[in-house]
Each structure stands twice: as C-alpha cells, then as structure tokens.
C-alpha cells in the first residue's frame, strides 16, 4: 500500500502504523528544535528511503519560536504551529512520509495541547488535514482514572480531526525537557513497569473514541545512564497485547506501542520490543549528542576561525570556516549519521510507503 509523500494523518497514519507492526519494524521519532534538525531528519529519512516521525517537546517548540519571546506559553503554541507549517510545506518534496507529533505534556501542559488542537481545527477546515498527526498526553503521575478520563476528553476533540493520541501508562524513568522522574539507584523499580490491566482499561475506554497509542514502561529511561541501573523487560509489552487480545478477541497485536528513551538501549531489546508491537521509538539524547559532537569536532579542527576573522598565524581570512552554515552543517551531518544507525536498528530503512 503506497501513501502520498508528505505529512500523514488520519487513515494514512493508521495504515502506516499497521504496516510497521505487520512488517516487524518501527519508525524513529526524532526530537527537533529548529529548521536545521527538521531538515536533517527529512534528508536522512529520504537517503534511507524510510518514513519518520518528527516530534517536538514543549521546550523545543518554545525554542523554535525564539528563546527570547517573553510570553513562553504563546511561544510554545506559535513555535509548534510554525514548525508544523514548515514540515507540511517541505516534507512532500523529500519523497517520504512524515508523522508530526508533540512529545510529553503533563497536566500543566494540557492547555498547550488544547491550544494546538484549536489551531488544528482551523487548519483542518482549509486543508482537510490536522496540523499534527498526533499529540502526547503524559498524565502518568496521576491515578489511572484521572489519566484516562483526561485522555478520553482530548481524544474526543482530536478524533474529529482524524488525529491520534499517545498516552503514557506507567512511568518512563529519567527526564525529558522538565517532564519525568529521577532514577534512584537501588530503589524499588516496580513503578517503572506498566501493568497490563491498566493497558486493558485504556483500550476499553479509548478504542471506541479514536486512534491512540500507548507509551508503556518496561524499564526504559530517558537519557543514557550507566548500564545495570534499570533492567529492560520488553516481555511486559507482550503481556499487555495478550491480555487485550484474549479479552476482546482481536488480532495478535491490538495495541500500538511506543518505546520512549531509545537512546543507549541494547539492540536485542529494541528488536524484542518491535516484535511485540512497538511501531515508534523515540530518540533524542543520542541525536543531541551526535549534533553537538559534529560541531565540536569542527570547532577543534578550525579553532582559529572562531576567535579571529583573519588567522593571526598566516594572515588568511577565516570567513569560509566561521560562516555558521559550515559548522551547523557539520552538526547536521553527524546527526544524520546517528539516524542512519537508528533506521537500521529499527528496520525501517528501504521501507518508505511513499510513492
Ligand atoms: Zn519520552
């Protein structure tokens, strides 16, 4: 089944998710902060003939609008709208399918998501497509009923616009842009693992309303930590699929599962998670490092150019080295190299559905 290249929403998005699960591969969801990282994600995806998910944290959208904008709530809303418009305009020209998504929103950030859905309502009237393919609500700090009731309210709004909702059950360790939880070494870690009964509850409530996915916790953490602190147990995902399948007589993988904290994860655990129905793996920490590492190497190599317009040693003008396009591009190239690896790990390379 081929899809039109560009931003995918609604039925096309559902088709893409199902194709990933049936085909045993997953899409990389890459956090972006500006046009440089957005374009590099699309370039890397096109080069690998892979579809991809571009996502923004609330802080990422604020930065996109400009770190100096005084009204930070407004910046987060306008930055997210501006970034989405950029992707809608360019994605189809890269010849791949792009999913547009926003990352963790806790209770404090629910008004941000509501404001983005307001913008999608306007956009939908004109384009028959929402601004975003999906948003995430992360109310995992709250009790399960409060979490799910708010998710149901949001999904009611979003499903009218053919949008999908990602929810979080259980707790992903570590922190992502101010949302998250510290890992205590040696502490009881049972809260880091999602209970299949909670997943079933979510399925019962949300599947009649619209399309949704679940960020389930199976010992995954944001960021890269010393090995051994938390044990990844992807078989928890399998138990959740099994429980829903048995209860409702669905196909083998009724749930659309999301793997948060993909950076630094063991390759065999990634493969196991995908086999249990993970269609999306978030990657941020490793790609942040890759971007900065590329810039760092460039600065080291052309050190003089960052302090002198004319090299004091030989009198040669340094403009061609300090032009910001040069070192920004060095960051992008290094970032894209890490994405090559991600597309390979996730099995999405060579499998774009875009025609
Ligand atoms: Zn996350």
Image (spheres, rainbow, N blue to C red):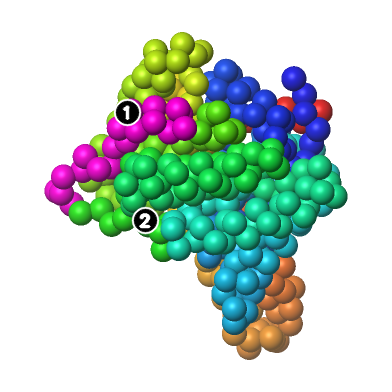
Q: Which residue is drawn at 49% across and 61% down?
A: 109
Q: Which residue is drawn at 59% across and 82% down?
A: 70
Task: Specify start and end residues of the magenta stretch as a single range.
Answer: 185-205
The vertical placement of 216 against 179, above or below, is: above
Q: Does the residue labelled 2 lie within 8 Å of ligand 1?
A: yes
Residue 193: x %, y % from top left:
29, 37
Q: Residue at x 43, y 33 (%)?
A: 202
**Front of the two marks 1 and 2:** 1
309 magenta-colored = no
Mark 2, secondary structure of its residue: strand
Q: How far apart are marks 1 and 2 (CA)?
A: 23 Å
Mark 1, secondary structure of its residue: helix
Residue 59: x %, y % from top left:
53, 65
Mark drawn on residue 339 = none
Q: Which residue is drawn at 45% across and 21% down?
A: 275
- Residue carrying label 1: 197
22 to the left or right of 168? right
Viewport quadrant of the C terminus: top right
Residue 204: x %, y % from top left:
45, 27
The vertical placement of 192 against 278, above or below, is: below
Query: Quick one: label 1, few (<14), some, or many (20+) residues within 10 Å?
Result: few
Q: Which of 184 and 248 is in front in this view?
A: 248
**How many numbered dots are placed on residues in this image?**
2
Residue 98 seen in render: no
Query: Quick one: label 2, few (<14), some, or many (20+) residues within 10 Å?
Result: some
Q: Nearer the viewer, residue 89 or 213?
A: 213
- Residue carrying label 2: 180
Q: In which quarter of the image is residue 34?
A: bottom right
């Amino acid at each position: 089944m081929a899809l039109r290249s560009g931003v995918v929403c609604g039925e096309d998005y559902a088709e893409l998710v199902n194709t990933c699960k049936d085909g045993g591969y997953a899409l990389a969801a890459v956090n972006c902060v500006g046009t440089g990282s957005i374009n590099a994600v699309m370039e890397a995806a096109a080069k690998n003939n892979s579809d991809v998910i571009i996502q923004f944290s609330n802080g990422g959208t604020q930065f996109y609008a400009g770190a100096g904008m005084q009204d930070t709530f407004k910046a987060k809303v306008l930055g997210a709208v501006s970034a989405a418009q950029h992707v809608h305009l360019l994605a189809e020209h890269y010849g791949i399918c792009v999913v547009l998504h926003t990352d963790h929103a806790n209770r404090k950030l629910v008004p941000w998501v509501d404001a983005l859905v307001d913008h999608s309502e306007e956009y939908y009237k004109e384009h028959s497509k929402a601004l975003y393919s999906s948003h995430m609500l992360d109310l995992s700090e709250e009790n399960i009923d409060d979490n799910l009731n708010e998710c149901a309210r949001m999904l009611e709004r979003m499903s009218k616009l053919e949008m999908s909702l990602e929810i979080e059950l259980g707790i992903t360790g570590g922190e992502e842009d101010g949302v998250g939880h510290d890992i205590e070494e040696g502490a009881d870690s049972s809260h880091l693992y999602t209970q299949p009964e909670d997943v079933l509850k979510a399925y019962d409530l949300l599947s009649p309303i619209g399309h949704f996915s679940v960020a389930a916790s199976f010992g995954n953490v944001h960021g890269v930590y010393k090995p051994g602190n938390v044990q990844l147990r992807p078989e928890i995902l399998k138990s959740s699929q099994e429980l829903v399948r048995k209860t409702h007589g669905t196909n083998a993988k009724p749930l659309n599962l999301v793997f948060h904290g993909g950076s630094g994860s063991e390759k065999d655990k990634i493969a196991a998670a995908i086999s249990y129905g993970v269609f999306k793996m978030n990657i941020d920490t490793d790609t942040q490092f890759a971007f900065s590492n590329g810039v760092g190497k460039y600065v080291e190599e052309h050190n003089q150019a960052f302090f002198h317009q004319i090299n004091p040693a030989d009198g040669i003008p340094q403009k061609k080295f300090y032009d910001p396009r040069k070192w920004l591009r060095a960051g992008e190239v290094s970032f894209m190299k890490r994405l090559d690896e991600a597309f390979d790990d996730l099995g999405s390379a060579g499998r774009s559905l875009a025609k």
